[in-house]
Amino acid sequence: MAPFPDEKKNGDYEKDVEMDSHLSDTDINITTNSNFITTSALEEQLEEEEAKKKGDDDKKHDSHSFSWMSRYTRHVASHPWKHLGVAMILSIVISGVGMVVGNFSVSADNNGWQSRGTLIANRQSQALLIRCKGDYIRQQGETAWQELTQNVQGNWESDLGCSQGGGGGEERNRHLLHWEQQHPTTSHTTSHTTNDTNDKNQFNSIKTQFHNTNRSSPVSITSLFATNKNRQDTINSHNYNDQTDFQTALNVNPAMRRQLQDATSSTSEALAGCDTSYYTRIFAYSRLFPVWKINDETTGSILSGAAIRDICIAEQNTQQLLETNGYCAGCDSPNKCLPPFSIVFFARLTVGDSSISLSCDQLATTWENDHLDTVQPLIQQCVSAMLEPTFNIERDPFPDVCPSGFFPSMVDESMLQNDGRVLYTASAFTSFPQNNYLLTKNTLYTLLDQYDRAGDVVTGAYDMDREDFVEHQVEVSVNQDMVLAMGSAFITAIAILVHTKSPWLTLIGLIQIILSFPLAYFVYTFIGQLEFFPFLNFIGVFVVFALGADDVFVAVDKWKNARLANPQGPVADVAAVALPDAASAMFLTTLTTAVAFFATAICPVAPLKCFAIFCGLLITFDYIMCVFLVFPALCIYDNFNQRGGGNCCCSLTGCCKKKGDGSDEAATEDDKEKVSFIHRILSKFYDVIHLLRWPLLAACIVALVISTIFAARLELPKNSDVRLLNPNKFQQEQAYEWRRKLLSQALTSTTGNPGYVVFGVDPADTGKHNDPSTFTQLVLDDTFDPSSEEAQIYLRDFCDRFFAQDFASLTSTDYKCPINRFDSWLQEQSTTGYQPDSAYTSSCNGATALPMDSTSFNQCVSAWAEEQESSAILSRDDVMKYTIVRFQQRVRFDSPFNELNSEWNLIEQWMENERNNVAPQGVNKMYHSSFDFWWYDTNGSMLSTAYSASGIALGAAGIVVLFSSRSVILTIFSLITIGYVLTSTTAMLVASGWTLGFLESICFSILIGISCDFVIHFGHAYAGMTGTRGQELTRHDRTKHALIFMGPSILAAGFTTICGAMVMIFTIISFFQRFATILFYTIIQATLASFVLFLVLTDTVGPAKPTSWVDSMTEMLCGKEEAEHNGDKKGSTGFAKSNEAE
């Protein structure tokens, strides 16, 4: 039987060759002279040597048969078609079941970009649910309480969990986080009833809507990738405050108001049949909202006549387009629009052209010649007053110096620094979706390229005020990016074909990679019970194509090395050596990469958790399918080659072969020559690094130090906003960039958003945290009891103490906490001569103020809340169960992370002191919450996940290296190399101007697993080398062997991954691009580090006997025999033992 290539040392092969030569030349007609051996004796001697040789072979076969993998591969080699067919059929059947029964579909399902299950998330979940359902509870009573406390509610992003009706009717079917960030609570009314209305309709102040037009939504969150597709078809349920009239909304003086009214009632064609009071509702819905930028930023100004003319003409052309398509509002016909509210509209009112009779040229001339010099100083004074620290745009009226009709979105924040020149302004078109919101929004998007962007003096960038065009473009771009995955598949196919020169192996390799997707989906859906499949998971397509070919390269190269060492051996013998070795090497790298992904699954944000789990499964199934598909395919491939029949499908080198023509031997020689050429190149490379090893070591140390210094400069982002499109490619993203320059953005950024203090509800989230389609039940605080006099006094005085803190301010000048409004009502009702309400006379037992009789408190406060129709206090069976305090925060979701962190801790410390030291029993479990802090918690959770997952991945890599090499020193070298890869990659990102946002953090934690693959291969080969009998291997021998033996596979794998990353760089979505960029940098640095740093370390100070320490410890603990057995087992399950391939 032919020997295994690993089992005979070089000397043994030479002896065999000599013996064969001697036997072939021996004359069997030997004389019987005593000086010669007889034929019979010679035959006996040969038989003895063959028996001895066979015994040695059998012993060596036993060591290989020790491994179940060896036994499996021998069976595969004997029946390759059977194994391939069964594996293919089973995998296709399972894949079909997973895709069909699992209802797989390509859709942008990207809700859920918030943390779930954390303290902050649990608080906000309960606060959001009860605030949203407040009216439903008040109207339906016990039915609503039972529904909310006993059943998990639906997806809050699509219907706010308000599918049962009730509270927040105007909020239903909205993306609440997106909406609230743009339209925070404010009120300017005085009556108690109106105060309650503000509790219910917290997003409806027209003045606030005008000011906050420029707020960006937290990209959850626009989301990451998603938009809410479930908005109401017709959104017309806003209940505006009666006192918020035209003058209040537009801040115009009576003369200007009369001017507009006269224009409306006149014969003016522009405004005939239109209602100018519609401007009070212009931002109640999403509007076409272009932002204009002056082209000459050095000397130009939006306030110049030329700029006014340019914008005026562009607005008219765009308005005509809207009228043609019937997307107008404010007039009798959808084919007629009110003029957009803009700097041009302001200029017309200022020059007295309320009838819109002047042409754009006439308006520009009149404005610049007669009014600009007077109005510009007033605007500057107005801007200066608004930028005063004491001014709060959410609360305060406009300063008196502001010219009538002026709004902060008309100028940019830097106006004062630019000597009164305005560089940016915005326009708001009255483009109302008359019939169907989604249809109209999508149609407005299709007209995007037809809107007039001006261009001579100013340039416009169009979007809707709630970034609908950005959301739509993200959806379109994600689908377009998936097409590039096919490009990644094509590159992978070409790389495999070039490396293997076998269409057969290329086909099986691609099938192996492709099938890993549905198989992973099967486990993900049916075993993992994960129903949520975010579009982020499709990054896995790029990942598996970029990394999937690596296993094919390793398997093919291991086979070729084994075949070259044993050119005439049976397929089963080669398989028993090559495939276990390949399986072991692939398992180690698969393990580290999969662990890096699975470690990221500790993230409490559903899309990232699901992405990590799915990609981990992809990597795992790619390995499994390589074992069950590529291994049999290699046996079939080798069988064809060994038979010598020409087959172009099996091997491109066999296309011209004819069976029996001897070209199979020639092909084998060609393969040897090719391998020898590659090995000669790597051998020369080793000679260079060996000669320069000490200078290279010093250079590597310096590079590691420099990389560490630069990597330490990586900073957190200045804001928490996340953008997914390139502003240089998309005007809607450019509109966002320019919008941030407006004065309105600066004012709202410094004002903060509303927060809440909640009493009576426990922090909890009882839904499936990995499934955004479920939300939570309402979980009441059973200990909440405000009826005692101590509790009443505490609640009554709470707001005075709370609003005395720097971190909290009133949401409006007349805001009063619900319990204080109740106290005022008691005092009012008990006033002498006042006719009390029936609720007071029937329920309050003559109470005059708080504190009141504890036995009457619950019934009285419940009656008051019902009379006032207030959802700020809710009762169940006439027992108070909940109340809320609203306040204005100093921070927003897009404030710097450190500011959010500091503010959260400041408020939490104050609240903790209240709970522990001030509040009496019954009211001492309150907490604060807001969407901004939920977003902060989401960001923080992803950052902490990145650090934790990085630690897990790095630790797993160290354990894998230690296990595979059984060498502490090699493990240290590997960790140093991995550390260099990470620091050098980070340094490159710092040089590119990146910050450590959560997307970058997640990428880092995942790519740790990828960065250690090459080092593991080299360490595996270094430690596994064995020399000839009596030969003492040096560190130089081992380093050269590792380089030559594994170098080709590593180079091929690196090339394929780099090509896959380069394809992904051309995607549109910035997250895909960033993932690809980090992958590209990581693979470049991992290749350099493994071929230079790691090999230089092993060649200079590497161990000659890498496993000696572990072996001695094993011997000490387990005994010598067990240690030797473990060592043999280790060697037989995958370590390359031979040098013949070199």
Image (spheres, rainbow, N blue to C red):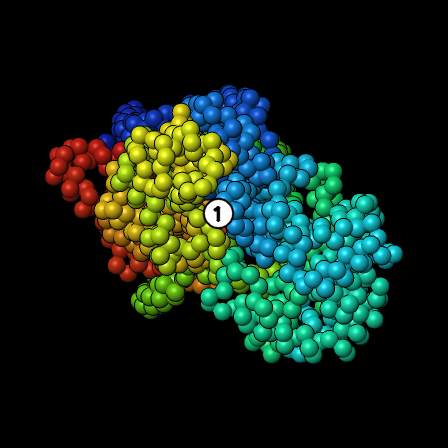
Q: Where is residue 89 in the image (x, y as percent from the top left)?
A: 54, 21
Name the residue rendered at 69%, 40% in the picture. 437
Residue 948 point in image, percent of width and height:
34, 47
> Residue 789's quadrant in the figure?
top left
Residue 602, located in which quarter of the rendered image? top left
Q: In percent of the image, x 72 and y 46: which residue is there?
A: 432
Q: Which of 155 and 505 is in front in this view?
A: 155
**Can see residue 329?**
yes
Q: Estimate how packed mark 1 is, as few (under 14), some (14 to 19) or many (20 or more) residues with alpha carbons within 10 Å.
A: many
Q: In the figure, residue 1096 lies in which quadrant?
A: bottom left
Q: In which quarter of the image is the N terminus?
A: top left
Q: In this view, does 715 lie above or below 364?
A: above
| Secondary structure type for disc 1 | helix
Q: Nearer the viewer, residue 212 or 851?
A: 851
Which residue sits at x=70%, y=44%?
441
Q: Dot 1 corresponds to which residue?
A: 1053
Q: What residue type is labelled 1?
A: Ala
Q: Position of residue 1017 (x, y in %)?
A: 38, 46
Q: Where is residue 1105 in the image (x, y as percent from the top left)?
A: 23, 49
Residue shown at 27% from the left, 28% from the top: 59
Considering depth in this image, is 943 or 783 the residue closer to the camera?
783
Is any atom of residue 1081 visible in this view? Answer: no
